Image: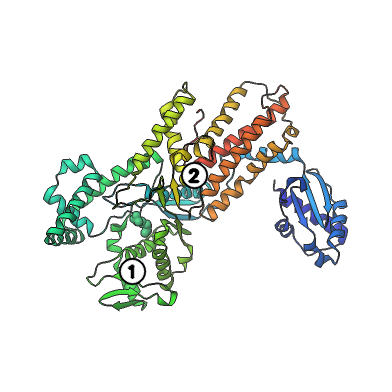
């Protein structure tokens, strides 16, 4: 039941009965309804000055007359206060409607199916070949994963793309280094770390002997020309990197539908370049080909270097077109750090200049940087925190806490994994995505703070209450037992869940779901502290158990949508 709309309908009827025909619709009134800052002033309020012009009456008079004319079952009372009309929803009816709806919709509760028939492409994680997966790639991976799940939940056809960074002259150097100093078994055993070592050595030795760089360039040319040996080594590097990354994706529960990365577009760029030329957008600049973006206050987009090599943006142009042609997306999201803001503004502008009006459906979902315990991360300067190490440490630490708190728990390893990984993911998704994050262990793993473990713990507590009630007599629920402010706060949060999810999708902002889960967990814990659930009176008990069940269901769903598991015992 949409209470806002129901209130609006009552107002509309009363308006007609009191003042005759008015040119206003229920949705208009619903939009004008305010939620008073303090529930003592009502659940909804209409500022009647908004009606005074149309009705040619003072707000005070309108409020007084309407208050006398409105009466409905679901309303506790209607009050006129200084030109405001305050509505109090009947507490029991409110609880009943919200809980019944949420439980009957079950796992679908929160989705209105508005994405059915629409397609979204999400570009996230997009790691680079021959580099270790470090915590700089955590946010893109988890924000992308959350947006993927959220869209699916609303019925969208979601396509997750890992746009691999698998192109560039460094791969020529890496092959050259491998041919000189590497061997198959060492790289196969050491994975990405071994490749990085080879690359570092190559650069060091090339400083002494610049001729090495020619060797690197020659190997890169071979990759470009499709030389079988070069390709074989290169593809092997790729599969070794992906195998390493796959372990991390498994721990995180992240999936992709496509791994088409930069090299995939090798043979798909020429048509784009031809088209740019045909549309008069390409300009020569010192031998290079550019799209001039001066009129839009941006530096030029470099499409071809003077030696004919293509660039990052050239590949992204081809990728954008390919995604549009292949998936016919309604929306295309790029979950990439804010350092690339300019790149995406340029990309979307060039698409616009090419006449693709679907550029409007492309969005850069930008986010801030992650530091670790106060230290900025840099690959060159040393402070690198590998994601796999971070996750494993989190699991170990969670395991130690569980050992202390619940020594009798059966599946401690499994729960430690869920809690440890959940803590990291939750921490990453807690703030507005554009903010920089400083990862701190004591904050992430605090069972009492605004953390993943806290929400998981609340979920497990709800599960445990429900387990205790198994087998007890159920009765017709007495929803008036949920009239106290604590129960009402929980009901209100549950009612807001669908709107929170919708806003999270519309703004590409998973943190709204993360925050919501904390708010609901806090409201539930207060309710639980203030009210006894397992009372003798079966009607009261049933109503409180139903609220507990709703909370369990919504917390679990909220956590799932941001990529976190919800153990039933902790
Ligand atoms: N591989 C890039 C990086 O790690 C991110 C790629 C993002 N996606 C894209 N289509 N440009 O910085």
Q: Quadrant of residue 104?
A: top right
* Residue 42 x/y as whole percent: 76, 47
* Residue 46 x/y as whole percent: 77, 56
Say which residue appears at 27% left-offset and 46% top-offset. Answer: 241
Q: Nearer the viewer, residue 202 or 173?
A: 202
Q: Which residue is mark 1?
A: 272
* Residue 80 x/y as whole percent: 84, 53
With respect to residue 323, does 449 lie above or below? above
Q: Which residue is mark 2?
A: 562
Q: Quadrant of residue 12?
A: bottom right
**Image marks 1 and 2: residues in contact by CB distance under 8 Å:** no
- Residue 229 seen anywhere in this rendered image of the structure: no
Mark 2 secondary-structure assignment? loop
Q: What is the C-alpha distance between the residues marked 1 and 2?
A: 37 Å
* Residue 514 x/y as whole percent: 53, 45
User: Pointer 2: residues within 10 angstroms few (<14), some, or many (20+)?
Assistant: many
């Amino acid at each position: 039941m949409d209470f806002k709309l129901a209130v609006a309908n009552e107002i509309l009827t009363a308006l007609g009965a009191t003042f005759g025909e008015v040119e206003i619709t229920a949705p208009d009134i619903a939009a004008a309804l305010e939620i008073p800052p303090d529930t003592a002033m009502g659940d909804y309020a209409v500022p009647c000055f908004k009606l005074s012009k149309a009705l040619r009456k003072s707000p005070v008079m309108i409020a007084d007359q309407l208050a006398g004319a409105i009466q409905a079952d679901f309303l506790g009372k209607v009050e006129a206060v200084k030109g405001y009309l305050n509505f109090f929803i009947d507490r029991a009816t409110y609880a009943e409607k919200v809980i019944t709806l949420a439980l009957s919709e079950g796992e679908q509760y929160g989705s209105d199916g508005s994405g059915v028939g629409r397609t979204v492409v999400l570009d996230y994680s997009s790691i680079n070949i021959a580099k270790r997966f470090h915590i700089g790639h955590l946010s893109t991976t988890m924000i992308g994963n959350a947006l993927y799940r959220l869209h699916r939940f609303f019925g969208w056809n979601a396509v997750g793309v890992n746009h691999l960074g698998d192109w560039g002259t460094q791969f020529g150097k890496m092959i050259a280094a491998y041919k000189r100093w590497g061997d198959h078994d060492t790289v196969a055993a050491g994975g990405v770390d071994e490749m990085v070592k080879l690359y570092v050595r190559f650069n060091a030795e090339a400083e002494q002997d610049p001729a090495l760089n020619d060797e690197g360039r020659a190997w890169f040319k071979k990759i470009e020309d499709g030389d079988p040996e070069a390709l074989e080594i290169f593809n092997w590097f790729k599969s070794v990197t992906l195998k390493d990354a796959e372990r991390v994706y498994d721990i995180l529960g992240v999936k992709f539908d496509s791994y088409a990365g930069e090299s995939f577009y090798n043979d798909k760029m020429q048509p784009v370049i031809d088209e740019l030329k045909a549309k008069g957008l390409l300009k020569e600049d010192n031998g290079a080909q550019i799209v001039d973006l001066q009129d839009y206050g941006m530096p030029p987009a470099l499409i071809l270097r003077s030696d004919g090599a293509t660039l990052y943006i050239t590949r992204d142009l081809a990728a954008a077109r390919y995604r549009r042609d292949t998936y016919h997306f309604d929306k295309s999201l790029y979950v990439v750090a804010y350092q690339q803001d300019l790149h995406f503004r340029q990309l979307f502008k060039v698409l616009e200049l090419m006449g693709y009006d679907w550029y409007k459906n492309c969005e850069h979902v930008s986010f801030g940087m992650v530091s670790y315990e106060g230290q900025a991360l840099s690959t060159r300067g040393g402070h690198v925190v590998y994601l796999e190490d971070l996750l494993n440490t989190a699991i170990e630490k969670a395991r130690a806490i569980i050992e202390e708190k619940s020594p009798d728990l059966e599946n401690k390893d499994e729960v430690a994994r869920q809690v440890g990984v959940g803590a990291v993911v939750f921490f990453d998704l807690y703030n507005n995505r554009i903010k920089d994050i400083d990862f701190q262990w004591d904050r992430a793993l605090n069972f009492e703070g605004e953390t993943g473990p806290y929400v998981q713990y609340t979920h497990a507590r709800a599960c445990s209450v429900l387990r205790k009630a198994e087998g007890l007599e159920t009765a017709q629920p007495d929803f008036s037992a949920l009239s106290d402010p604590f129960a009402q706060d929980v009901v209100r949060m549950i009612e807001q869940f669908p709107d929170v999810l919708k806003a999270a999708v519309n703004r590409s902002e998973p943190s709204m779901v993360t925050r919501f889960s904390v708010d609901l967990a806090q409201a539930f814990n207060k309710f639980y502290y203030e009210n006894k659930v397992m009372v003798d009176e079966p009607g009261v008990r049933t109503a409180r158990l139903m609220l507990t069940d709703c909370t369990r269901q919504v917390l679990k769903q909220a956590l799932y949508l941001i990529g976190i598991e919800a153990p039933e015992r902790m």
